[in-house]
Every structure is written in structure tokens, then in C-alpha cells.
Amino acid sequence: MSGPKRNPDSLNTIGIVVVGICGAVLIYVTIVALQAFYMNDTSEIQTMADYGGNDTSARSIKTAQIHNITDVGANAVAAPKPGETPKTPTYHVNIDDAMKLVVESAKVDPSTLVPTQGRADKATIKPIFGRPQPIAPAPTPTPTPTDGAGSGSAAPAPAAGTGAGAVPAAGTGSAAPATAPAATPEKTRAPAPAAGSAAAPAAGPAAAGSAAKGNGP
């Protein structure tokens, strides 16, 4: 058969690949653009759903705190009970004015900056460098019993009924009365008290005479 000549039967592979790549890129860009639009449109709703307005309480607390330190007026005082003396009202001032008053009080007397603690004029830590070391409280003095003669006092020596003189005991603090034995031989004198001890004075003329008779030659 004779006829017109046909073109060769072949595919344009390069064109097909280029069209496929361009279509894939276009589809990807379209998806990304739609996702971005969706996220931008729903971001406020998503934020409210995630946090639920948690910042509202923080803002209200901050507002209340600022109001407390800047408000000026009288403090609330409870009503007195029957028969109770009414309490003296107190007042609050602005924090800026309060700081100025504190500075002025510190210039006059720094030890009264904390009214509820009284005067702070006693040191509680040692004035040394390093870790604070508290000052130990002063020890409480122990009362001394006052039974008999005290330290350094002299007790009177009683006279002996047998004619022997009273011999003072040699002590280191107080002088205690001591009686010599009845069998003391004649011409025996009482030993002198040790140095630093207090000698007991004779208890009256009768004791002096008795001691002279017992210790005489």
C-alpha cells in the first residue's frame, strides 16, 4: 500500500518528566500554603484552648498587689466586744512615702526599725570574718547556799568546860571552831593558825580567861 509517511512512534520522555516534577512541586506548595493559612487562622483559638486564660489570674494578682502598696487609707478594725476597749485605728500609706519615713527613722534611731521586735541594740553574732557565729548567752549565776559561816568569815570559838583552851582550826577559806582534847598536857600551847587562814576571835572575856588558864605555864 502506498500512502503518506507517518511520524516515528516514540514518546517525549523529557517532557513527561518535566511536567511531572512541576506538577509535584505545585501540589506541595499548595498544601504548605493551605496549612499555613489554617494555622494562622486558628492560632488564637488553639492558644486559648491550650492555656485557658491562665494569665488572667496572674494579671489580677499583680493588680491587687499594686493596689495594696499604693493605696492610702485606714486599716480595717474589728468591732469591739461588749465591755472591751475599742482598738486604736491604724493607717497605711503609699510604699514610696513609707520608704522615706523608714529612712528618716533610721537616721534618728536605727535600733527601732522593727517595731514588733523592740530595740535591736545587742549583737547576736561575733564580729569576725567568715561564717556567722552566734554569741553564746551569758551563764546564769548559781546561788550559793548560806548555811553556817560564809567564806572568809570567822566563827566564834566556844569556851571548853574542862579548862582547855579552844584551838582554832587552820582552814583555807572560813575558820571553823575546833575544841582541843581534854587530855592536853600542861605547858602545851595551841598551834598557830596557818598563813592565809582567819583566826577565830575569842567569844567574850570568859573564853579569853579560860584559854589563859589552860595554856599558861
Image (spheres, helix red, strand yellow):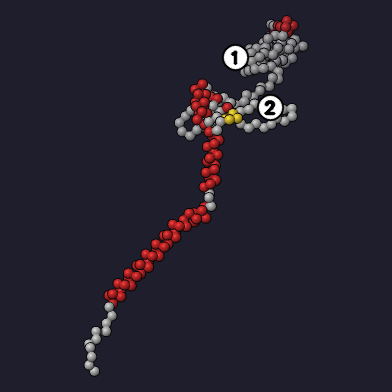
Looking at the rendered structure, the secondary structure element under dot 1 is loop
As drawn, 142 above or below 166 = below
Point out residue 184 in the picture as x, y percentages from the top left corner. Answer: 71, 13
Residue 50 visible here:
no
Point out residue 25 in the picture as x, y percentages from the top left corner. Answer: 34, 67
Residue corresponding to mark 2: 86
Please report the residue visible at 69 percent of the width from the left and 6 percent of the height from the top: 217
As drawn, 136 above or below 19 = above
Looking at the rendered structure, the secondary structure element under dot 2 is loop
Rounded to the nearest angstrom, the CA distance separating label 1 from label 2 is 73 Å
Q: Give amino acid for label 1.
A: Ala
Q: Which of the numbered marks, if any, corresponds to residue 195?
A: 1
As drawn, 69 above or below 44 = above
Point out residue 162 in the picture as x, y percentages from the top left corner. Answer: 76, 11
Q: Which residue is more in the foreground, 140 or 53?
A: 53
Point out residue 112 in the picture as x, y percentages from the top left corner. Answer: 55, 25
Q: Residues within 10 Å of mark 1 (few under 14, many from 20)?
A: few
Q: Residues within 10 Å of mark 2 (few under 14, many from 20)?
A: few
Q: Give amino acid for label 2.
A: Pro
